[in-house]
């Protein structure tokens, strides 16, 4: 959606942006709706699990790249580092988000050889490449928009549906679904942290346009 300047301050802008993000058609996509109802066969679940892992295992690196771009704002660096600390499982190797995702893969009977072997789908490659490009862009406001509003707000409703669908279709208990269930609440906190960090950069039309784009 093309951005139209509202003349509003950063708080009003972020509330308007939240409504736009939460109302995006992707959150009610027919695939997601069917998945949430448990309408997925074993092969489809395996394909999803393997392909989505390609993003999950590098998603922390988007944040790391963004931190390196915020050279002169230590407060912003600290806010991003707080989110990154959670992503790294508070430095517990068994609780990092990729580790939690591998627990999910193993519960599906997918071993390391299998989750590494299939080629990454072009759409996933594009998704990863786009995130790297935005998080590493010299104008870090673009990365803030991509990793803040565009990432943190949609995750809770999407992951809630994924969790429901995986319980129904694959019969997985909550421990194996922790990578999804934990984000339903955690990303609410992450969203607050990110919005507080973004606010100083979204007080004028140019800043709002960069965060939105």
Image (tube, grey):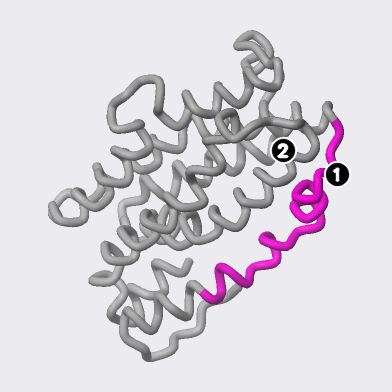
Residue at horizontal 26%, vertical 62%?
197
Q: Would residue 119 appear left or right of 100 to someone viewing this image?
A: right
Query: In the image, residue 193 lies at what x, y percent?
Result: 30, 59
Residue 198 located left or right of residue 109: left
Q: How many marks?
A: 2
Q: Position of residue 147 (x, y in %)?
A: 42, 53
Eyeballing the image, is 13 above or below 65? below
Near mark 2 (Cα within 10 A), the count class, few <14, some 14-19 or many ≥20, is: many
The image position of residue 68, as x and y in percent, is 24, 42
Quadrant of the rendered structure where residue 90 is?
top left
Query: For this view, does 78 lie left or right of residue 198?
Result: left
Mark 1 crowdedness (10 Å alpha carbons): few <14, some 14-19, many ≥20 = some
Of residue 196 and residue 126, the one placed in the foreground of this image is: 196
Give the number of the disc on residue 39: 1
Identify the residue at the far bottom of this view.
7
Q: What is the secondary structure assignment of the residue under circle 1?
A: loop
Q: CA distance from mark 2 to mark 1?
A: 9 Å
Residue ID at (48%, 43%): 182
Figure quadrant of residue 188 = bottom left
Residue for point 30% across, 81% down: 204
Residue, disc 2: 166
Determine whether the residue tagged by mark 2 lies in a helix, strand or loop. Answer: helix
The answer to whether 119 appears left or right of 18 in the picture is right
Q: Tell me the magenta residue range.
A: 19-41
Point out the image quarter for the N terminus: bottom right
Front position in the image: 4 or 138: 4
Image location (x, y in percent) of residue 43:
83, 27
Question: Which of the numbered marks, if any, corresponds to residue 182?
Answer: none
């Amino acid at each position: 959606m093309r951005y139209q300047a509202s003349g509003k301050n950063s708080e009003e802008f972020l509330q308007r942006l939240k409504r736009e993000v939460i109302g995006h058609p992707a959150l009610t996509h027919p695939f997601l709706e069917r998945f949430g109802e448990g309408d997925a066969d074993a092969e489809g679940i395996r394909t999803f699990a393997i392909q989505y892992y390609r993003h999950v295992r590098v998603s922390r690196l988007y944040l790391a790249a963004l931190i390196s771009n915020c050279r002169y704002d230590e407060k912003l660096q600290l806010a991003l580092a707080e989110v990154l600390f959670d992503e790294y499982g508070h430095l517990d190797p068994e609780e990092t988000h990729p580790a939690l995702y591998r627990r999910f893969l193993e519960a599906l009977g997918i071993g390391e050889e299998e989750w590494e072997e299939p080629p990454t789908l072009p759409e996933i490659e594009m998704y990863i490449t786009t995130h790297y490009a935005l998080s590493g862009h010299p104008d870090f406001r673009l990365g803030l928009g991509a990793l803040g509003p565009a990432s943190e707000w949609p995750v809770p409703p999407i992951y809630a549906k994924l969790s429901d669908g995986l319980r129904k279709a694959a019969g997985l208990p909550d421990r194996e679904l922790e990578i999804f269930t934990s984000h339903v609440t955690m990303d609410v906190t992450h969203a607050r942290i990110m919005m507080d960090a973004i606010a100083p950069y979204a007080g004028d039309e140019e800043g709002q346009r960069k965060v939105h784009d």
